[in-house]
Image (spheres, helix red, strand yellow):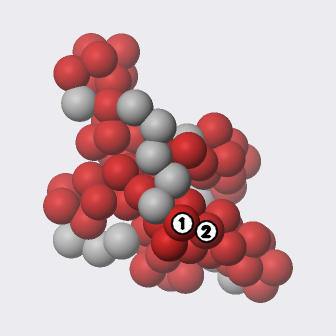
Amino acid sequence: MYGVRIAIDPFTAMAVALNDMVKGVGMDEVGFSQCIVRFQPYLRQVNEAFLNKFGKDLEKLIRYETTGIFTNLLIAIVENAVESGQMLN
C-alpha cells in the first residue's frame, strides 16, 4: 500500500509513515530517524502534510516522543529544512 500512496501523494505518504512509527507504546527510533534523514530534502512539504493530516507539526511530535540529545538532533534537522525552505521537486 505504501508504494501506491508514495506514487499518488508522496508527502502525505511520508507523513503517514512517520506517524506509524510512533503509534502505540514506544517509538521506532531507528526507523523514525532514518526517515527524517532520508526525507530531509522534503521535510518542509512533509511537515505541511503532517500538520494537515494529524493536526500537529513534526516538531511537536518529536518533542513529545523523544528526549535529550536525540530530540535536539531531530529538531535541528526539521527546523533547518522548514526554515530554509528546502524544496526539491
- Crowding at label 1, few (<14), some or many (≥20) Cα neighbours within 10 Å? few
Report if the CB atoms under discs 1 and 2 are less than 8 Å apart.
Answer: yes
Badge 2 amino acid: Asn
Left or right: residue 42 compared with residue 13: right
Residue type at mark 1: give it: Ser
Frontmost residue, 1 versus 72: 72
Count of marks placed on residues: 2
Against 25, is 20 above or below?
A: above
Q: With respect to residue 37, does 56 lie above or below?
A: below
Residue drawn at the location 40% of the way across and 32% of the way down? 89
Q: Using the image, determine if residue 25 lies above or below residue 79.
A: above
Q: Position of residue 87 (x, y in %)?
A: 45, 46
Q: Which residue is drawn at 32% across and 31% down?
A: 10
Furthest-right residue in this view: 69
Secondary element type, mark 2: helix
Residue 53 located left or right of residue 44? left
Which quadrant would residue 67 be assigned to in this image? bottom right
Tell me the SS state at disc 1. Answer: helix
Q: Tell whether 74 sits left or right of 50.
A: right
Question: Residue 57: image x %, image y %?
Answer: 36, 71
Which residue bears the numbered disc 2? 80
Query: Residue 32's mark?
Result: none
In terms of image quadrants, where is residue 35? top right
Q: Residue 84 carries which label?
A: 1
